[in-house]
Image: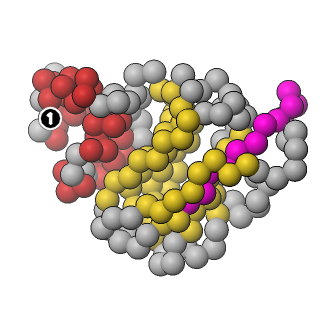
Amino acid sequence: MKLPFENRGISRRELLKGMGAAAVGMMGWLIARPAEAMTAESEAELLQIGSPGAETLLTSMLTVNNQERDLLNSTNSQSPTLDRCLPYGRVIWSGRKAGSADIQYRVLARSTDPSGNPLGDGWYLVMQGTISGPAQSWFRVEFAQGNWDQYRVEVASAVSQTVFNRIVGVR
C-alpha cells in the first residue's frame, strides 16, 4: 500500500529525515521544498497534514489586492482573524503566493475577557513586514505568543494575487 506522499516520489526515509530536520516537523520541511516540486494535489494535502505538536487554526485562500483585509477576507478592523489563541507558545503562518508582487502584512493582537469581549480599545502591533519572492513561492512567518487571546493578520498587495494560507498554533 502506498502512502499519499509516495505518489510524489518522496520516500519514507526522506519524509522521516525531513520531519527530524524541520523546526516544526513536516510542515516546515514541505515549505522548504522548491515550489516547482509542489502540485495542486500536494498543496491540497498540505492543508490537511498535521505537524507534530501543532494544531491548525486556519486554512484559507484569499485574493489580496490594494485594500487591506485579513486572511478571512474581512475589512472590518475590529474583527479577529484568530480567536482563543492563549494556549499556544508560537503561532506559525505559512503559505504560497501566486503572484510575484510583494505582500505587506501586519500582525495585530489583543486580550479579551472570558466572554470574548476586548479588554481595551484597538489592537497591539505584534509585527509587520513584507513577503517577497517570485510567483508560486512559499513563505513562513512565525510570531511568538505574547499571551494574546485574539490575532488579526492583515495583508495588502499593489497587484492583485491569490494567496493560500495555513496558520498553526504550537503548544
Amino acid residing under circle 1: Ile
Q: Is residue 48 above or below residue 109?
A: above
The N terminus appears in which quarter of the rendering? top left
Find residue 45 and report its horizontal and vertical position in percent.
Answer: 34, 40
Image position, residue 35 (x, y; %): 25, 55
Numbered disc 1: secondary structure: loop
30 relative to 97 in the view: left or right: left
Question: Tag 1: Cα neighbours inside 10 Å, few (<14), some, or many (≥20)?
Answer: few
Residue at 59% x, 27% y: name it.
Answer: 88
Looking at the image, residue 152 sits to the left or right of residue 63; the answer is right
Task: Check the image and tell me how it is coloured.
Answer: secondary structure
**Quadrant of residue 150 within the rendered picture:** top right
Residue 81 % position (x, y): 66, 48
Q: What's the magenta region?
A: 105-116
Image vertical order of residue 70 relative to residue 80, above or below: below
Quarter occupied by the C terminus:
top right
Residue 96, magenta (yes or no): no
Q: Which residue is mark 1?
A: 10
Check if residue 106 falls in the magenta segment. Answer: yes
Count of numbered labels shown in the rendering: 1
- Is residue 2 visible to the viewer in this orientation of the structure? no
The reply to whether residue 11 is visible in this rendering is: yes
Viewer-closest of 110 and 135: 110
Please indicate whether residue 48 sits to the left or right of residue 144 in the image.
left
Taking 111 as reference, is 78 above or below it?
below
Residue 169's x, y, as percent? 54, 31
> Could you tell me which residue is drawn at 87 percent across and 50 percent down?
121
